[in-house]
Image (cartoon, grey):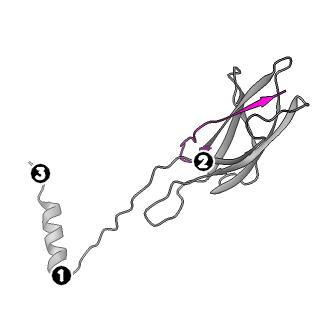
Amino acid sequence: MKSLRPLFIAAAIASLGFVAYAQETTVVDTPPTLSDVTPVAGTKVSQRTQVFSGTAAATGTSGSGSVNHGIDRVLWRIQGDGKWRKALLSARGEQTTTFTFKAKLRKGEDHTRVIIRAIDEGGRESDWIVRKIRQ
């Protein structure tokens, strides 16, 4: 049998003239985004070691418009290599941060694909960006 106590408490509060309002907060579960990533896809380079950079932004918001999570990390890897590496962030935990890393392209191949992703503090992951760099 359910207790009637909460019902009696609510009735007593209402009889005193108190009105309780509940504010509803809507959370938009939007993953982070990556933008302005350089070098652009298809770039032809002469050096095996290349510097990549770009911007990562956390876009998940609450109903009040405040950001719930900042960028926790940006990870990258060479396609075919299972190990994800951390990029250097200018401001970890912030809504928007720039990142940079150096990648050594595969020797003796005509191109290398570099995969980049961002993860916010809530664990949400961006779409992967793939950069095919020609040598």
Residue for badge 2: 33
Helix, strand or loop at label 1? It is loop
Magenta-tinted stretch: 119-135
79 is within the stretch colored magenta: no
Residue for badge 3: 2
Q: Amino acid at mark 3?
A: Lys
In the image, residue 131 lies at what x, y percent? 71, 34
In the image, residue 36 lies at what x, y percent? 71, 49
How crowded pointer 3 is (Cα within 10 Å; few <14, some 14-19, many 20+) is rated as few
Specify the farthest residue to the right: 47
Rendered residue at 75%/40% (across/down): 40
Rendered residue at 53%/43% (across/down): 124
Point out which mark residue 16 bears.
1
Does the residue at mark 2 contact the one at mark 3 (Cβ under 8 Å)?
A: no
Quadrant in the picture for residue 115: top right
Who is closer to the viewer here, 72 or 33?
Answer: 33
